Image: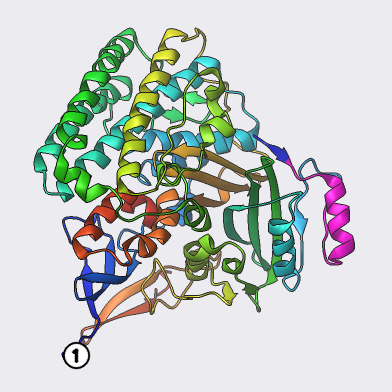
């Protein structure tokens, strides 16, 4: 009888399907996966340590580089945590502009997900389509803050500059385009037989397992748990908008894809409502130049595009934070990777890496 | 935003776990507990159905020079309730029970704390560094940390203390 033994294959850190510098040690039994261990740290920049030597305002641009495809959401999370610590009341107009930007960024981030997923499945066309549409959002960010990816637009106390008419006009054009865009995606991907065969009933995470791994965001919702911080915490006037939480049923790759597609629809709905009811008024609260929050600590979480992003800040009463800890959703979601890959074929591991959607800037911090 | 753990529960826990301390004057009192009683307390907080803290929202450590403080922020989905539990660890003995025994999803976060802050977790399934190189000799998030100089000697990467610039 032929003897077989387990074989360890290193995928990454330089591998086209691992989304940045993620290394996965895949243990193979023939073509079946017996285990998958993520190895991290190739992009570790020490942002938490770096923040201890910067003033609060200087920390905000550092958060851009956490999840670099959804910078607005990270800025927002940090600003809200500092505002909670210092008790700053943000004007309503600023809150609405923040919501528009965060939701636009959510759509842009899901474009990256769709693009990289279809690219990994062998359809480079899909990536071109998704990135074509993402470009439109990045151009909107260019108008509102002069930067396309590292926005640094939400600031402590409000936003950097008021949004102009031109921005609202072009955002409206984009929102009107969203149904047509999703229709195109449905025809291109969801209707494709090969795409369905690769996605349906692969890498299933059950509801119980998803909760056990501490997952959050679209990955958790795909497993059927209705858990969205925007609904629960109602931060930044999210309670004024009417939107649904898309959830999946089985928690397979297909659900993880569909949840994100439906989230794009919901985000478009939120942006439309925010633009229709945009209040007038100042875009920035009065924050002293020499900003010193009182002694104490605060934890604030927001719904990032990848899940529950939390900032824990300890202040010692000086201009610089004493300690900042960032709860990064992709870092925690990655714990499920081993469970997702076990028993699957090696070719399906690539799909699992794509649908769990880790972003290494956030994982390594 | 949710509600915070009720004061009467604090007193209830205090009768059960003698080392539990809290400042009743505070708006959102933190629950301090000794390292020995942490694990049974956490089991109680998670499994008792009147709190049902099913999520470890955030777990981190803060270096206060004389001691290292573990900070556990718990969240209950059912009651939308929060609680902060803290454990003070003396600098010479930074060992604490691993929370993976209660919430398995804290595995990576505890590895990160071990890596960056140098806290040892007892009964952790895979206690290795996660972000820094495996043979890195220091814990960067400690307040007394001085960056080390990488050097390649005989094809092997080693780390050296910086010479003082004075």
Q: Position of residue B146 (x, y in %)?
A: 46, 68
Front residue of A80 and A181: A181
Mark 1, residue position: A3
The answer to which image quadrant residue B122 occupies is bottom right
Neighbor class of circle 1 (other Cα within 10 Å; few <14, some 14-19, many 20+) is: few
Q: Position of residue B25 (x, y in %)?
A: 86, 44
Evaluate whether residue A203 shows in this view: yes
- Above-or-below relation of A204 to B88: above
Query: Over which residues does the magenta segment extend?
Result: B4-22
Q: Residue at x 57, y 75 (%)?
A: B120
Q: Position of residue A136 (x, y in %)?
A: 21, 24
Q: Position of residue B2 (x, y in %)?
A: 67, 36
- Element under disc 1: loop
Q: Chain of mark 1?
A: A
Say whether residue B36 is left or right of residue A40: right
Front residue of A22 and B45: B45
Front residue of A272 and A187: A187
Residue B104 in the magenta stretch? The answer is no
Q: Residue at x 65, y 51 (%)?
A: B74
- Above-or-below relation of A286 to B132: above
């Amino acid at each position: 009888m032929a003897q077989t033994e387990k074989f360890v294959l290193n995928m990454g850190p330089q591998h086209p399907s691992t989304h940045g510098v993620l290394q996965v040690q895949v243990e193979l039994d023939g073509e079946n996966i017996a285990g998958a261990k993520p190895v991290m740290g190739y992009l570790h920049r020490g942002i938490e340590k770096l923040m201890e030597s910067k003033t609060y305002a200087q920390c905000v641009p550092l958060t851009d580089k956490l999840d670099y495809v959804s910078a607005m959401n990270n800025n927002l999370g940090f600003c809200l945590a500092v505002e909670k610590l210092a008790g700053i009341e943000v004007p309503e107009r600023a809150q609405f502009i923040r919501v528009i930007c965060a939701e636009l960024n959510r759509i842009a981030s899901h474009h990256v997900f769709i693009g990289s997923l279809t690219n990994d499945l062998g359809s480079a066309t899909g990536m071109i389509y998704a990135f074509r549409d993402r470009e439109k959002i990045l151009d909107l960010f260019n108008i509102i803050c002069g930067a396309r990816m590292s926005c640094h637009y939400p600031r402590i106390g409000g936003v950097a500059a008021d949004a102009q008419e031109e921005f609202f006009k072009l955002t409206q054009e984009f929102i009107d385009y969203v149904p047509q865009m999703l229709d195109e995606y449905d025809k291109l991907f969801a209707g494709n037989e090969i795409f369905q065969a690769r996605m349906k009933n692969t890498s299933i995470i059950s509801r119980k397992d998803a909760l056990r791994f501490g997952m959050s965001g679209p990955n958790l919702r795909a497993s059927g748990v209705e858990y969205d911080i925007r609904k629960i915490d109602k931060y930044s006037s999210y309670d004024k908008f009417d939107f649904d939480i898309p959830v999946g049923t089985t928690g397979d790759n297909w659900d993880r894809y569909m949840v994100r597609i439906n989230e794009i629809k919901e985000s478009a709905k939120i942006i439309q409502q925010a633009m229709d009811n945009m209040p007038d008024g100042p875009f920035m609260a009065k924050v002293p130049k020499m900003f010193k929050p009182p002694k104490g600590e605060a934890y604030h979480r927001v719904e990032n595009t990848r899940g529950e992003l939390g900032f824990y800040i300890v202040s010692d009463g000086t201009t610089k934070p004493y300690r900042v800890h960032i709860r990064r959703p992709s870092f925690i979601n990655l714990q499920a990777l081993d469970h997702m890959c076990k028993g699957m074929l090696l070719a399906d591991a690539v799909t699992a890496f794509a649908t769990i959607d880790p972003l290494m800037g956030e994982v390594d911090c | 935003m949710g509600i915070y753990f009720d004061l009467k529960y604090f007193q209830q826990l205090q009768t059960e776990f003698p080392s539990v301390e809290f400042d009743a004057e505070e708006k959102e009192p933190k629950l301090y507990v000794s390292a020995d009683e942490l694990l049974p307390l956490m089991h109680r907080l998670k499994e008792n159905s009147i709190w049902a803290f099913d999520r470890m929202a955030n777990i981190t450590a803060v270096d206060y020079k004389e001691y290292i403080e573990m900070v556990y922020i718990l969240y209950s989905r059912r009651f939308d309730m929060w609680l902060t539990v803290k454990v003070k660890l003396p600098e010479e003995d930074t060992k604490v029970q691993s929370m993976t025994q209660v919430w398995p999803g804290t595995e990576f976060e505890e590895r990160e704390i071990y890596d960056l802050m140098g806290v040892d977790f007892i009964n952790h399934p895979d206690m290795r560094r996660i972000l820094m190189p495996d043979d890195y000799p220091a814990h960067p998030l400690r307040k007394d940390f001085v960056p080390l100089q990488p050097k390649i000697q005989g094809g092997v990467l080693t780390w050296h203390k910086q010479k003082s610039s004075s």
